[in-house]
Image (cartoon, rainbow, N blue to C red):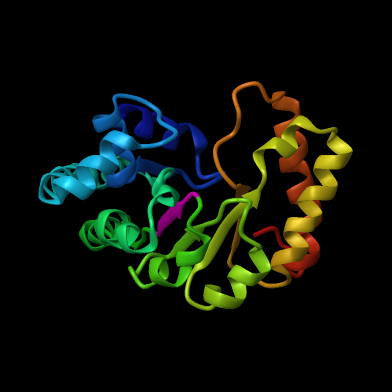
């Protein structure tokens, strides 16, 4: 991974920033305990409720590993890092804070936030976490990722003065025509509105069967349409 980070950073040659990545401790733990993907999370939630101290011990170990992993990526040249909590939305508000958010907060605290003479931003993302944006912002992160179920304008009103927002086009839009993709991109941009602090992105990962040209149409639309919201500059 570190060889890849160094290689990609060199080949990018400053054209765009390179974002490092890790799954969150909770999300990684779900795969460890379940043995793969799950719809019910019966095994890991059963462990959480029946033997919470065991799960906390696992999450603590994974958290230390994620901190070391992301700091190594920063050392290899990653200019920002993102913690990706795909399955945090499967938790209740109380268990989310205890078994997911608290550990992401430890990661934020443990990361090297300066490298190469500049700040290294940290992005937190919880799929299905729209109800907890304020608590996520309290971790001290620099940006929050949003999935497509959260209105980006409402999110900006709630936390946009504290953190940047990343998102949040529904990935399935990329199955539509380039014309429709352009229209949907415009709606996301209009939803955020004028000013800085918006990193345009999908609301989750790109689907494997999407036509790459459709992803290109999205990027082109962002470059074209975002100028009106940023005084002639793309943000």
In what quadrant of the picture does the C terminus appear? Answer: bottom right
Residue at point 67%, 72% (across, down): 195
> Which of the 4 image quarters holds residue 38?
top left
Judged left or right of residue 95, residue 192 is: right
On the image, the x and y values in percent for residue 185 come to 76, 50
Residue 144 to residue 182: above or below? below
Residue at point 26%, 54% (across, down): 99
Residue 226 to residue 155: above or below? above
The answer, for residue 124, to whether it is visible in the render is: yes
Query: Range of the magenta residues?
Result: 121-127
**Residue in front for this viewpoint, 216 or 102:** 102
Judged left or right of residue 125, residue 160 is: right
Total marks placed: 0
Judged left or right of residue 209, residue 35 is: left
Judged left or right of residue 194, residue 163 is: left
In what quadrant of the picture does the N terminus appear? Answer: top left
On the image, the x and y values in percent for residue 189 come to 74, 60
User: What secondary structure is the magenta-colored segment mainly?
Assistant: strand
The answer, for residue 69, to whether it is visible in the render is: no
Residue 142 to residue 65: above or below? below
141 inside magenta stretch: no
**Residue in front for this viewpoint, 58 or 231:** 58
């Amino acid at each position: 991974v570190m060889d890849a980070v160094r290689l990609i950073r060199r080949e990018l040659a400053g054209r765009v920033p390179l974002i490092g990545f890790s799954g969150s401790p909770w999300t990684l733990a779900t795969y460890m305990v379940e043995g793969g993907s799950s719809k019910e999370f019966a095994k890991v939630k059963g462990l959480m409720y029946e033997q919470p101290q065991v799960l906390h011990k696992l999450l603590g170990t994974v958290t230390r590993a994620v901190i070391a992993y992301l700091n190594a990526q920063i050392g290899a040249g990653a200019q920002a890092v993102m913690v990706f909590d795909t399955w945090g939305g499967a938790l209740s508000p109380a268990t989310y804070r205890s078994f997911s958010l608290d550990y992401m907060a430890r990661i934020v605290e443990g990361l090297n936030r300066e490298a190469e003479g500049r700040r290294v931003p940290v992005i937190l993302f919880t799929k299905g976490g729209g109800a907890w944006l304020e608590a996520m912002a309290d971790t001290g992160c620099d940006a929050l990722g949003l999935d497509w179920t959260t209105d980006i304008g409402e999110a900006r009103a709630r936390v946009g003065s504290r953190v940047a927002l990343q998102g949040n086009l529904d990935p399935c839009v990329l199955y539509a025509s380039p014309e429709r993709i352009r229209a949907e991109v415009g709606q996301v941009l209009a939803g955020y509105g004028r000013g800085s602090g918006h990193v345009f992105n999908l609301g989750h990962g790109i689907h494997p069967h999407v036509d790459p040209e459709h992803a290109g149409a999205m990027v082109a639309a962002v470059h074209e349409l975002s100028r009106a919201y940023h005084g002639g500059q793309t943000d």
